Image (cartoon, helix red, strand yellow):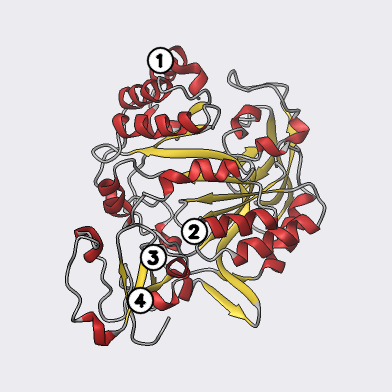
Amino acid sequence: MRRGCRWIKVATFRAIRCIPPDRFSSLKPSRSIPLYARRLVVRGGRGYNQAVSQSECALVEQGFIPGSCGTLYKGRKEAACRVTLKWKGDTPYRLIKSTHLSRPEHYFSIYQSGCNFSCKKCHSWEFTLRAQGKWMSPRDIARLADQYAEQVTYYEPRERATSFHALDLCRGYGACVELVPLQPTWTGRPSKYSLRRTGRRSPLCPGKLEPEQIILSPQGFGPARNIIAFTGGDLACQPEFYARSTELIKGLDRGLWVLFETNGYGLTPRNLDLLKSAGVDSFWLDIKAWDEEVHKRLTGASNRWILRLPEGILKRGFVLEVLSLFIPGWVEANQLAQIASLLAAVDPNIPFTLLAFFPQNELRHVAPPSLEQMLEAYQAVKEKGLRQVRMGNLGVFVRKEEDMQRLLTSAADGI
């Protein structure tokens, strides 16, 4: 981009022009520049979210609008790609909050700091909207993946490289095993544990695993599946880190699948093609809302491109699953049904998870959905023709034994 230019969106979502300063003041609104586009004029060299110069935004280079990527760093907001991504020579480094075997997904999760959305309801806002963590390179990620491969207790086929299918194997109740303390420390508390069979199973256990395949992780009991997932924050708009990490993971030849949990905003056609060539296997696409204005209020960015992604993702041969949150007063049954209708038109077999919102971040004052609301939304989604639908965060809306019995009676296939 030429120094001093200002970007203005013209006519379509993808059409962007650079206007030199000497011509900018002479521009007059015309029918070729719709009102909503004229409002996107960049002022003072700052971008859509006032955090990043348009000339530095990788999305702008591809004809897209920057996301809402302000990340708190040393007391002020900076663009996430400035403060949670860096380069040393030709090697990208990402700020990683933590890494561990997560539940109930039963796969190895890499929790990233920094995001191209600023979601009001983000449950990981402490590190996605604030720069914190440890700098890691793709080689560091591959080293962790290699170590995790030694723990894997269950190998999924590629088409099941999802979070959705985790509960087909194990619900994490831990009834089949018990902790046996080992090596007590000077405090009298054990520093290590082993697991042994109990001879029991939960009534809701799928019965597909042996107790020997269950291990303990920081988030509870379950298997270790052969999946490495990027989660937490999302910088798909800067795909090189993910592409290089994936190439190194695949180079290990350990039978590991790579999953990307994403809001989709950075998955431009060019970025999708790069991630495909690198070997990324699957996406867990979080569609925050159907209504564009609601989406903007929730995330700071539009959803127009995101709603076109399911078709583009599947067309390239990726595995796709989708989730959406039920947020009372924001995203309820009507919007969730619209999302389901969109997905069913692309492929009715797309796995869809209907998650119950729990109060966090700027929406701490919003009450979680009730059992009645979740059941209503579940039925509305199913009526659109999706064949694989599941409710999540059951503990939010199932408070009593009677609630669970009602859920099992009304929607046993949805848990």
Q: Give the image location of residue 177, x and y in percent.
A: 69, 31
Residue that badge 4 annotates? 18
Residue that badge 2 annotates? 234
Residue that badge 3 annotates? 66
The three-letter amino acid code for the residue at tag 2 is Asp
How packed mark 3 is, by other alpha carbons closer than 10 Å (few <14, some 14-19, many 20 or more), is many
Q: Nearer the viewer, mark 3 or mark 4?
A: 4
Residue 200 lies, with reference to residue 212, above or below; the image says: above
Quarter of the image containing the N terminus? Answer: bottom left
| Residue at x 36% of width, y 59% of height | 118
The three-letter amino acid code for the residue at tag 3 is Pro
Measure the C-alpha gap from mark 2 to mark 3: 13 Å
Residue that badge 1 annotates? 406
Residue ranking furthest to the front: 31
Q: Earlier in the sequence, mark 3 or mark 4?
A: 4
Q: Nearer the viewer, mark 2 or mark 4?
A: 4
Which quadrant of the view contains residue 110?
Answer: bottom right
> Which secondary structure lies at badge 2?
loop
Q: Earlier in the sequence, mark 2 or mark 3?
A: 3
How packed mark 2 is, by other alpha carbons closer than 10 Å (few <14, some 14-19, many 20 or more), is many
Q: In the depicted view, which residue is nearer to us: 244 or 105?
A: 244
How packed mark 4 is, by other alpha carbons closer than 10 Å (few <14, some 14-19, many 20 or more), is some
| Residue at x 34% of width, y 50% of height | 121
Q: Earlier in the sequence, mark 1 or mark 4?
A: 4
Measure the C-alpha gap from mark 2 to mark 4: 28 Å
| Residue 23: mark | none
Residue 82 lies, with reference to residue 177, above or below; the image says: below
Q: Nearer the viewer, mark 3 or mark 1?
A: 3
Q: Nearer the viewer, mark 2 or mark 3?
A: 3
